[in-house]
Image: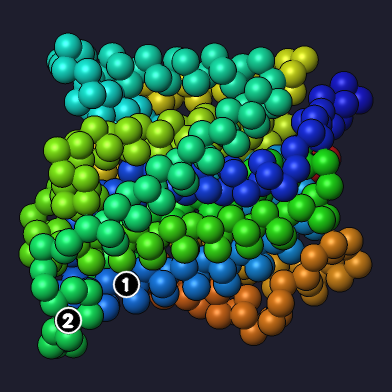
């Protein structure tokens, strides 16, 4: 038993700071979703002001969420994020289910990013046409190897790629606002909105895509254990990162809506590319390809780190094989990272943009709802826990965040029954899997 306890207490290196915290939020959130989603949303919503309002509304929701998450993360700075708080509040089984939900949600993402990287790279280098998937696997392999040596190399890569991504996106925004728009009426065109059942369904579908694009804002929670001063840095990382993302998203959407009529945006698979054509002319395809590649490289690096931290945390708690908690000298959970690499190779065969984003949004509302409920329970159940940061507006804003999450989940269940059925099926099979893991790792779980 003593040996099992010792293994379960393995901890990651505390070498990260606020710069990494902000860069991981920006890097894990802003990807090709913001370049592709505007087109899908333009199909759903008939009004530019309504579209921008949805992006702002989702951003305010993220700020609301970040406040409650900051308290939980600073209170329990452990690798793996939300499942730690949920387990403490609701017990072992719910913690197990939430942890695996979170892992599946995050481990499937790199497959999509690798496919997109393959597509954009072959556009820049036509001689690679026909090898899109091989190029994507090449990116996956390179970034796995980059992250294997240790967290310091991973941190440096994340900071550099996140900064370059922000700079390139601002170049796109500036180019659009300095260009002559294709529409003389500009951005503020009042269009009649008929509020009916169809529009409400479309609203929830649009919010589902938007929240899928915002997914990643809670990335700080996965690396809290590696922060050198979590009590000070975590809340700041959440808020600075969230405000940066919201600002960029509003600017990018505003720029696209400024230069293109809504009908053109809806017809363009990649709205940002059509906007760049107006802003940069013949150079547009090269510009947008470079922006897309750096955006995806940054988010791919982040998502090579995130699921491996979740799997490390699950392994340490006895929710996966004990080898998943092994660390190399650089502080990398290398077995977990390699497992994620193999799973991503499998997922590469089955990803599409809308399916991944839609499923991510549904699963995200489940995990965040349980997290907010955990904060309410732990304030009463564990009032003496050290809380370096306390959520503002508690309990009212936490209850509001929980309510919004539940409303979104219900809305998504109605508007996307396929993702809802998948989530329900996953939850149903989680209990027999939990019983199996309990039997195999009973000694670990019993004493946690």
**Residue at the farthest top position:** 127
Where is residue 225 drawn, in percent x and y? 76, 41
Asked whether, in this view, residue 343 is left or right of residue 88, the answer is left
Where is residue 51 drawn, in percent x and y? 27, 71
Q: How would you rate the neighbour count of disc 1 (Cα within 10 Å): few for under 14, some for 14-19, many for 20 or more? A: some
Between residue 239 and residue 248, name the one nearer to us. Answer: 248
Q: How many marks?
A: 2
Is residue 443 visible to the viewer in this orientation of the structure? no
Secondary structure type for disc 2: loop
Instruction: Verify CB contact (< 8 Å) between mark 2 and mark 1.
Output: no
Is residue 232 visible to the viewer in this orientation of the structure? yes
Between residue 299 and residue 347, name the one nearer to us. Answer: 299
Asked whether, in this view, residue 7 is left or right of residue 146, the answer is right
Residue sitting at x 61%, y 17%: 148
User: Is residue 19 shown above or below 213?
Assistant: above
The residue that label 2 is drawn on is: 189
Which quadrant: the C terminus? top right
Between residue 168 and residue 194, name the one nearer to us. Answer: 168
User: Is residue 14 shown above or below 428?
Assistant: above
Where is residue 328 drawn, in percent x and y? 73, 15
Q: What label sits on residue 52 in the rendered view?
A: 1
Asked whether, in this view, residue 182 is left or right of residue 52, the answer is left
Q: How would you rate the neighbour count of disc 2 (Cα within 10 Å): few for under 14, some for 14-19, many for 20 or more? A: few
Secondary structure type for disc 1: helix
């Amino acid at each position: 038993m003593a040996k099992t306890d010792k293994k379960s207490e393995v901890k990651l290196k505390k070498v990260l700071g606020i710069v990494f915290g902000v860069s991981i939020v920006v890097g894990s959130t802003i990807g090709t979703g913001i370049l592709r989603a505007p087109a899908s949303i333009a199909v759903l919503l008939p009004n530019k002001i309504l579209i921008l309002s949805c992006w702002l509304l989702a951003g305010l929701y993220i700020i609301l969420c970040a406040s409650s998450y900051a308290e939980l993360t600073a209170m329990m700075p452990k690798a793996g994020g939300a499942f730690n708080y949920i387990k403490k509040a609701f017990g072992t089984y719910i913690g197990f289910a939430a942890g695996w939900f979170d892992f599946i949600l995050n481990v499937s993402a790199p497959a999509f990013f690798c496919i997109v990287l393959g597509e954009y790279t072959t556009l820049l280098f036509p001689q690679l046409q026909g090898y899109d998937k091989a190029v994507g696997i090449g990116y996956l392999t390179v970034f796995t190897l980059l992250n294997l040596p240790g967290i310091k190399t991973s941190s440096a890569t994340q900071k550099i790629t996140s900064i370059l991504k922000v700079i390139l996106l601002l170049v796109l925004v500036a180019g659009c606002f300095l260009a002559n728009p294709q529409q003389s009426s500009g951005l503020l065109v009042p269009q009649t909105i008929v509020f009916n059942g169809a529009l409400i369904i479309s609203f929830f579908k649009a919010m589902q895509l938007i929240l899928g694009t915002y997914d990643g804002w809670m990335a700080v929670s996965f690396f809290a254990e590696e922060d050198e001063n979590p009590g000070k840095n975590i809340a700041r990382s959440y808020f600075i990162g969230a405000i940066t993302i919201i600002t960029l998203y509003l600017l990018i959407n505003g720029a696209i809506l400024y230069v293109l009529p809504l009908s053109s945006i809806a017809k363009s698979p990649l709205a940002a590319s059509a906007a760049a054509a107006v802003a940069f002319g013949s150079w547009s395809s090269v510009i947008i390809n470079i922006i897309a590649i750096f955006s995806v490289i940054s988010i791919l690096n982040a998502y090579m780190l995130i699921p491996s931290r979740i799997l490390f945390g699950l392994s340490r708690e006895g929710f996966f094989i004990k080898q998943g908690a092994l660390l190399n000298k650089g502080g990398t959970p290398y077995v977990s990272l390699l497992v994620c690499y193999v799973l991503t190779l499998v997922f590469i065969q089955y990803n599409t943009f809308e399916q991944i984003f839609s499923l991510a949004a549904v699963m995200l509302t489940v995990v965040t709802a349980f997290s907010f409920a955990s904060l309410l329970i732990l304030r009463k159940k564990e009032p003496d826990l050290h809380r370096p940061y306390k959520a503002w507006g508690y309990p009212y804003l936490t209850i509001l965040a929980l309510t919004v999450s539940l409303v979104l989940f219900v809305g998504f269940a109605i508007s996307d029954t396929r993702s809802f059925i998948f989530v329900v099926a996953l939850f149903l099979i989680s209990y027999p899997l939990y019983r199996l893991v309990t039997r195999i790792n009973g000694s670990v779980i019993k004493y946690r």
